Amino acid sequence: MTDLPDRRLLLVHAHPDDESINNGATMARYAAEGAHVTLVTCTLGEEGEVVPPSLARLASDRDDALGPHRAGELAAAMAELGVTDHRFLGGSGRYRDSGMMGAPQNHRPTAFWAADRDEAAGHLVAVVREVRPQVLVTYDPNGGYGHPDHIQAHRVAMRAAELAADPGFGPDLGAPWDIARIYWNRVPRPVAEAAFARLGEALDKTPFAKAGTVEDIPGVVDEAVVTTEIDGAAFAAAKAAAMRAHATQIEVAEPWFALSNALAQPLFTTEYYELARGGRRETVLPSAGNRRSAGTRETDLFQGVTP
């Protein structure tokens, strides 16, 4: 790939819809600012539960046609975010959704959870060396909430970052590239708690019968862990539209949404991250109102990064 912009962002996610929920505002913002945004999705999400009754036939225990359908939803979501570079890891359908932890689907030969880590990472190395991202975004070591595909996505992304910089690995995959910064998706606990308090007051004005809890949000951590926040308020509509495009998985009623469990939760337009590698981490203390003091969190994933 030639003539790449000066700023290049790579996101690695497990299933279609994860990107819009976790990073939709971030992706839309950087795409609008002219950065090259690349999304790699590791599976088609074939084992997802289907929300609309009219599409229930797509489920894996019926027609098993959910994966291709979700690929179409993902394409629609990317159009809403202005992202033009999306790939499936190793090609569409290479790795299958593993289902929840402990499910029999974990052990299918084609399940992403069962994949050889270095083989899967090799597919991602090829992407890294092609687009040469300065920034990588993925999950924490627990995948945010313990889903096997999210954990595997973390492992594969971190391993690919290591291998991509190694001149002895896969010389046929392109020139080595060292990713300057790696971020993990996070949500500060005070932010989540405040959002659920607002949801509790507004629940009777939503289409949802019941609210979830902070524990339903992946990646919630003490705010001292969070190093970076991206203000995506200007792209709230784009994020909501992208999430709405994932209609088999998400019901959106801004500024709330629900997954297949029908439990309402907040739709965040400021998105939060932990700088896991690169740059300089800062220890920050909470300020009044459970906000960090001005300037103590990064506000740009590319802060201090050179082209």
Image: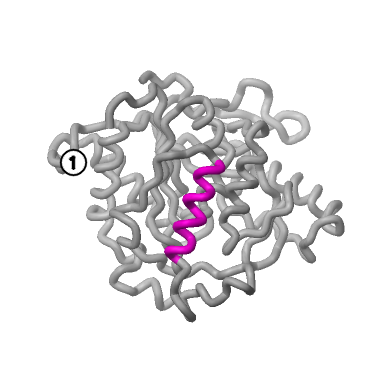
Q: Is mark 1 on a helix, strand or loop?
A: helix
Q: In which quarter of the image is the N terminus?
A: top left
Residue at horizontal 67 percent and vertical 29 percent from the top: 292
Q: Is 64 located above or below residue 84 in the figure?
A: below
- Check disc 1: other Cα within 10 Å, few if <14, some if 14-19, many if 20+: some
Q: Is residue 79 magenta?
A: yes
- Identify the magenta region: 67-80
Q: Is 298 located above or below residue 277 in the figure?
A: above
Residue at horizontal 77 percent and vertical 30 percent from the top: 288
Residue at horizontal 59 percent and vertical 32 percent from the top: 229
Which amino acid does the dot numbered 1 rest on? Leu
Q: Mark 1 points at which residue?
A: 173
Residue at horizontal 62 percent and vertical 59 percent from the top: 250
In the current view of this chain or complex, which residue is farthest to the bottom? Answer: 62
In the depicted view, which residue is nearer to us: 295 or 266?
266
Q: Is 299 located above or below residue 245 in the figure?
A: above
Residue 26 seen in render: yes
Q: In which quarter of the image is the C terminus?
A: top left
Q: Does the magenta stretch include residue 146?
A: no
**On the picture, is 77 further left or further right than 250?**
left
Residue 16's x, y, as percent?
A: 48, 55
